[in-house]
Amino acid sequence: MIAEVNQGLLPELRLASEHPHHPVTVHSVSAPWQLVGAGNYAAVVEHPEYSGLVVKVYAPGRPGIEAEAEVYRRLGKHPAYSECCYSRVKSGFLILRKLHGTTLYDCLRQGIPVPQKVMQDIDEALAYARRLGLTPHDVHGKNVMMREGRGIVVDVSDFMNPEPCTMWSDLKRAYKLLYPPWLRRIPVPDLLLDVIRRGYRLLKRR
Ligand SMILES: Nc1ncnc2c1ncn2[C@@H]1O[C@H](COP(=O)(O)OP(=O)(O)O)[C@@H](O)[C@H]1O
Ligand SMILES: [Mg+2]
C-alpha cells in the first residue's frame, strides 16, 4: 500500500490550502483512489484494494503531521478513535484505520437525528485523552462522527495544542439549546451551515 501511495497517489494528487481556517481544495485524485473527506489541513482518500484503511495527506505547507502521529501513539487502542498504522512525515501522509460513520455536520445536513449517547461517548473519549496528558482541541461537527448510535472522534491532529479551545463545549451547549428532538429530522441547508460556521468564527474572532 505504501508503494501505491508513493507511486499512484502522491504524484497525481493536487491539494491546495488556500486559507488555514477553511477546508483544503482537492483538485484531482487519480483513480482508483477516492476522496473520503477534506479538512482544513489535509485530504483523506481510500483505495478499493485496501479496505479498512485511509490515507490522510497533508496539504503542502500545512504543519502538524508529526503531532498527529504522536497523538495516535499515545491514544493506543480506544473504541472512539482511529489508529495510525504508518506515518511518513517527509512525504506528508499517514495511513489510518478507516472509521465508518457520518460526521455530525453531515447528520445535520441530512436530517439524521443525533442521540444524546453520541455526545456522551465523545465526552468520555475526550476525557480519556485528557487523562493521557493530551489537550483536545478543534473538536467540531466535521471532526466527530456517529456510527450505530455511538460517538467517534475522527480528527486528533490538534490534541497537542495547549491553547484553550471551547468548540466542543460550545457544540454541546448548542446541542442542548438548539437541537430539540422534533427538529432533528429536518435537514439543514449547506448555506445555513456555512453562515453558522462563519458567524461562530466571527463571534470567537479566530
Ligand atoms: N480515519 C478516518 N476514517 C474515515 N474518514 C476519515 C478518517 N479521518 C478523516 N476522515 C474524513 O476526512 C475528513 C477530514 O479529515 P480530518 O482528519 O478532519 O482532516 P483535518 O486535520 O484537515 O481537519 C473528516 O471530516 C472525515 O470526513
Ligand atoms: Mg478536521
Image: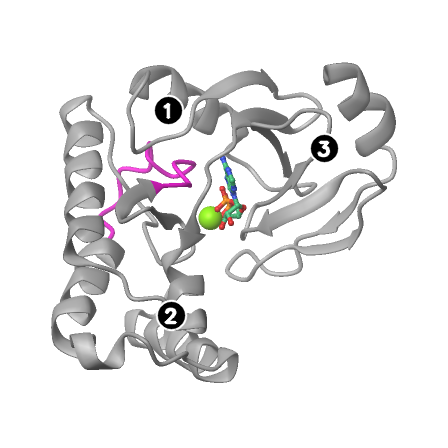
Decide which of 180, 41 is in the foreground and name it. Answer: 180
Q: Position of residue 84 (x, y in %)?
A: 48, 21
Q: Is residue 190 above or below residue 138?
A: below
User: In the displayed structure, does residue 70 sit left or right of residue 54?
Assistant: left
171 up-or-down from 134: above or below: below
Q: Residue 23 placed where, x, y %?
A: 57, 58
Check disc 1 and report its element: helix, strand or loop: helix
Left or right of residue 48: residue 137 = left
Disc 2 designates what residue? 108
Residue type beneath disc 2: Leu
Residue 93 is covered by the magenta coloring? no
Q: Quadrant of residue 26?
A: bottom right
Identify the amino acid type marked 1: Val
Which residue corresponds to mark 1?
71
Foreground residue among 117 and 131:
117
Magenta extent: 153-165
In the picture, measured across the screen, residue 35 lies left or right of residue 192, that is right
The quadrant holding residue 55 is: top right
Mark 1 or mark 3, which has the lower sequence index? 3
Lower position in the chain sequence, tag 1 or tag 2: 1
Query: Between tags 1 and 3, which lies in front?
Result: 3
Sequence order check: which comes first, mark 2 or mark 3?
3
Give me the residue at 20% from left, 59% from top. 115
For disc 3, the marked residue is 47
Local SS, label 3: loop
Number of other residues with Cα within 10 Å of mark 3, as a class: few under 14, some 14 to 19, many 20 or more: many
